[in-house]
Image (cartoon, rainbow, N blue to C red):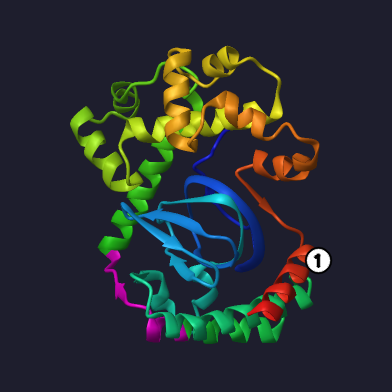
């Protein structure tokens, strides 16, 4: 699977609401603002080199072109709103230069969450088609974000630097996605991008929130996890296919990532009653249909 670290775009749509069933999402970026609300479960978010832990009912904001990684111990349900900065072009063009920082106090988050849920209900009621109510609520929601979320305003120069950084991140991730199954060294990526190894090492750590070796290991382990569930390949074949130098290195890296050996992990999901859960866990994330999302949303509203 290529482009794990993808720049996601949504065509002509300026906003999109969906529910995702998530276990793990490798580091990625997109061009939109993304607001997430946990409907069920708990999630670890790695962004800006820091790890945040969120429980049911928590809300957070991801800025455009901001690298982030998501992980959950058990599949978590997340309500997501992705909005292009161009959506606000006529009313508040400064949003293109706005960068949200840390989340506000829990009480204010609760108020924002209610508006977010109203947006989702309006969106699903109209099957994703544009509606005056949904558009109005999104404007109201972002107005509240600007009031209650700490934020800063970037200069045009800072915004251009951010865009250039995102482009470089994409080139790095593309190279790793194409070569993770081979012997892969930081010097290889540096040579391909025309950078010094020292600069790339520091840039990688600052941009991805982890070292080059840690990122490659996480990606290889995620690829191996999918093969363990999806195929009957031997552990040796999976180890080789995912770029591990030997089976011992594979076992050590996988155990560190998932808390058990590859063999133990595969055995956990060989029971027939876990077939559906296993299927959903094969993908990095499963975006649910609008109808299913509506049912989940109503269930959450009744329980909250």
Residue 175 visible to an observer of this rendering: no
> Is 207 included in the stretch rendered in magenta?
no
Q: Is residue 199 left or right of residue 182?
A: left
Q: Is residue 11 left or right of residue 28?
A: right
Q: Quadrant of the N terminus?
A: top right
Q: Dot 1, crowdedness within 10 Å: few (<14), some or many (≥20)?
A: few
Say above or below: 54 vs 172: below
Give the residues in magenta. 144-156
Residue occupied by mark 1: 291
> Looking at this view, is 286 or 249 the one in front?
249
Residue appearing at x 42%, y 30% in the figure:
217
**Quarter of the image holding residue 290?**
bottom right
Q: Position of residue 188 (x, y in %)?
A: 33, 21
Q: Quadrant of the C terminus?
A: bottom right
Residue appearing at x 53%, y 51% in the figure:
72
Q: Position of residue 277 (x, y in %)?
A: 72, 45
Q: Is residue 11 left or right of residue 296?
A: left
Say above or below: 228 vs 171: above
Q: Is residue 271 left or right of residue 41?
A: right
Residue appearing at x 32%, y 47% in the figure:
207
> Looking at this view, is 122 or 135 the one in front?
122
Q: Position of residue 199 (x, y in %)?
A: 20, 36
Q: Position of residue 287 (x, y in %)?
A: 68, 54
């Amino acid at each position: 699977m290529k482009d794990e670290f993808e720049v996601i775009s949504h065509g002509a749509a300026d906003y999109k609401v969906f529910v995702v069933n998530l276990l793990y999402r490798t580091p990625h970026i997109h061009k939109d603002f993304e607001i997430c609300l946990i409907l069920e479960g708990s999630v670890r978010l790695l962004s800006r080199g820091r790890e945040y832990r969120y429980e049911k009912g928590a809300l957070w904001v991801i800025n455009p072109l901001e690298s982030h990684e998501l992980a959950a111990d058990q599949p978590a349900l997340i309500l997501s709103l992705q909005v292009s900065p161009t959506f606000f072009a006529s009313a508040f063009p400064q949003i293109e230069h706005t960068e949200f920082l840390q989340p506000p106090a829990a009480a204010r988050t609760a108020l924002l969450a209610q508006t977010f849920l109203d947006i989702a209900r309006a969106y699903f009621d109209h099957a994703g088609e544009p509606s005056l109510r949904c558009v109005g609520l999104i404007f109201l929601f972002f107005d509240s974000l600007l009031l209650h979320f700490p934020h800063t305003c970037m200069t045009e120069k800072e915004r251009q630097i951010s865009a250039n950084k995102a482009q470089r991140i994409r080139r790095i991730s593309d190279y790793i996605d194409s070569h993770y199954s081979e012997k892969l060294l930081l010097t290889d990526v540096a040579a391909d991008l025309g950078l010094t190894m020292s600069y790339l090492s520091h840039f990688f750590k600052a941009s991805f929130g982890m070292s080059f070796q840690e990122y490659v290991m996480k990606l290889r382990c995620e690829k191996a996890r999918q093969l363990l569930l999806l195929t009957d390949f031997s552990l040796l074949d999976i180890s080789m296919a995912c770029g591990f130098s030997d089976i011992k290195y594979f076992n050590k890296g996988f155990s560190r990532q998932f808390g058990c050996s590859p063999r133990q992990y595969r055995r956990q999901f060989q029971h027939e009653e876990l077939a559906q859960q296993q299927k959903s866990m094969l993908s990095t994330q499963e975006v649910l249909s609008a109808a299913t999302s509506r049912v989940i949303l109503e269930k959450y509203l009744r329980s909250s």
